[in-house]
Image (spheres, rainbow, N blue to C red):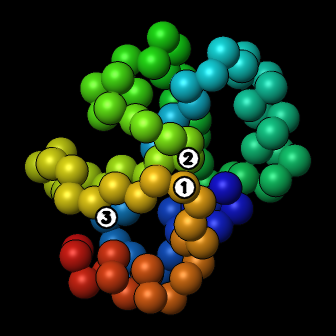
């Protein structure tokens, strides 16, 4: 989450919007506390209960990162953890925008 938080404000990337989706049953206060603990201040959580988006995107594992283009079409999917600070990943994303 911290590297995802930094990716949202990475100056090398333009027109990037990150939506962290919570598919659990946690309440807003618990999520806010988690974000505060990790100093997540560039992201706003979206609550997907009862997992409508998870079903729509056929999520198979958590975490899952789904990348959509400006037309809302999926062009990549990452299942599992990733370091969003990785320069190769940032260059790849930059080349797509």
Q: Tell me the residue at 22%/76% (across/down).
A: 96
Q: Tell me the residue at 43%/81% (across/down).
A: 90
Q: Is residue 37 left or right of residue 82?
A: right
Q: Residues within 10 Å of mark 2 (few under 14, many from 20)?
A: few
Circles 1 and 2, Cβ within 8 Å, touching? The answer is yes
Q: Residues within 10 Å of mark 3 (few under 14, many from 20)?
A: few
Q: Secondary structure at mark 1?
A: loop
Residue 9 location in percent, x, y? 53, 68
Q: Secondary structure at mark 2?
A: loop
- Quarter of the image with the N terminus in it: bottom right
User: Sequence order check: which comes first, mark 2 or mark 3?
Assistant: 3
User: Sequence order check: which comes first, mark 1 or mark 3?
Assistant: 3
Q: Residues within 10 Å of mark 1 (few under 14, many from 20)?
A: few
* Residue 61, placed above or below residue 47: below
* Residue 46, placed above or below residue 69: above
Q: Is residue 41 left or right of residue 11?
A: right
Residue beneath disc 1: 80
Numbered badge on residue 4: none
Q: Is residue 79 left or right of residue 85?
A: left
Tell me how far mark 1 sits from mark 2, CA to CA.
5 Å
Q: Tell me the residue at 38%/76% (across/down).
A: 13
| View extreme (front): residue | 60
Is residue 62 in sight in this rendering?
yes
Residue beneath disc 2: 63
User: 42 or 64, which lies in front?
Assistant: 64
| View extreme (top): residue | 50
Residue 95 picture quarter: bottom left
Q: Secondary structure at mark 3?
A: loop
Numbered badge on residue 15: 3
Q: Tell me the residue at 47%/48% (across/down).
A: 64
């Amino acid at each position: 989450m911290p590297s995802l938080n930094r990716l949202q404000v990475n100056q090398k990337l333009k027109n990037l919007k990150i939506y962290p989706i919570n598919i659990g049953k946690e309440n807003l206060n618990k999520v806010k506390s988690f974000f505060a603990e990790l100093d997540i201040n560039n992201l706003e959580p979206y609550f997907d209960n009862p997992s409508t988006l998870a079903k729509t995107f056929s999520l198979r594992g958590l975490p899952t990162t789904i990348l959509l283009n400006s037309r809302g079409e999926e062009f990549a999917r990452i299942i599992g953890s990733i370091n969003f600070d990785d320069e190769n990943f940032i260059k790849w994303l930059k080349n797509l925008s």
